Structure formats: structure tokens, C-alpha cells
Amino acid sequence: MSSKANCWEYQKCGTEKQCPAYPIYGRLCFSVKGTLCRGEVQGDYQDKIKRCRSECTFYKDIIDEA
């Protein structure tokens, strides 16, 4: 997958149009309130960043690019 893919492309979730990060914030999804992760609605940044850091390969790849 391209290193510039959006979250929904990277994860192949198929729910991008229901995601609050769609279509503009696909590479910053971890900072958007109410995104979908494994089919579950997530909270705000403070609620979900720990899980993103430990479990999300997309987040880890984004950080590695920086």
C-alpha cells in the first residue's frame, strides 16, 4: 500500500463514507472524534490515542514517515 494512503484505504474497512475523517482527514484519523476502528465508534483524541499508539499499524506507519 502506498505510504500516502488514507486510513480507509490502508485498512480496507469499506466504511469510509460513514467515517468522520472522510474525505479530508484520512491521514489524521487519530485526531478526529468519532472515527471507526474495527467497526466501533471511537471517542476523541484523548480517549483513543493510547490505543492508536499500541494497536494501529496505520498510526505507526504515519509516525514512522515523520
Image: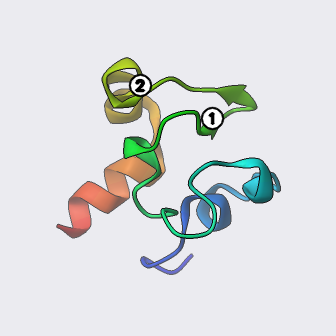
Residue at horizontal 59 percent and vertical 39 percent from the top: 35
x, y percent for residue 25: 48, 62
> Where the C terminus falls, by quadrant?
bottom left
Seen in the picture, residue 34 relative to 6 is either above or below; the reply is above
Q: Is residue 50 left or right of residue 10?
A: left
Residue at horizontal 78 percent and vertical 58 percent from the top: 17
User: Along the line of sight, which residue is nearer the eye, 15 or 18?
Assistant: 18
x, y percent for residue 36: 65, 37
User: Along the line of sight, which residue is nearer the eye, 17 or 53?
Assistant: 17
Which quadrant of the structure image shows residue 3? bottom left
Mark 2 and mark 1: span between their CA atoms? 10 Å
Task: Give neighbour class at mark 1: few <14, some 14-19, many 20+ (Cα, 10 Å).
Answer: some
- Which residue ends up furthest to the right in the rendered image? 14
Residue wearing tag 2: 48
User: Along the line of sight, which residue is nearer the eye, 31 or 58?
Assistant: 31
Q: How many marks?
A: 2
Residue wearing tag 1: 37
Q: Is residue 65 left or right of residue 24?
A: left
x, y percent for residue 47: 39, 18
Question: Mark 2 near mark 1, Cβ–Cβ under 8 Å?
Answer: yes
Secondary structure state at the residue bearing disc 1: strand
Q: Amino acid at mark 2?
A: Lys
The circle drawn on residue 46 is none
Residue at horizontal 52 percent and vertical 69 percent from the top: 24
Seen in the picture, residue 2 relative to 19 is either above or below; the reply is below
User: Along the line of sight, which residue is nearer the eye, 60 or 21?
Assistant: 21
Residue at horizontal 63 percent and vertical 35 percent from the top: 37
> Of label 2 and label 1, which has the lower sequence position?
1
Q: Amino acid at mark 1?
A: Cys
- Which residue ends up furthest to the top in the rendered image? 47
Seen in the picture, residue 54 relative to 21 is either above or below; the reply is above
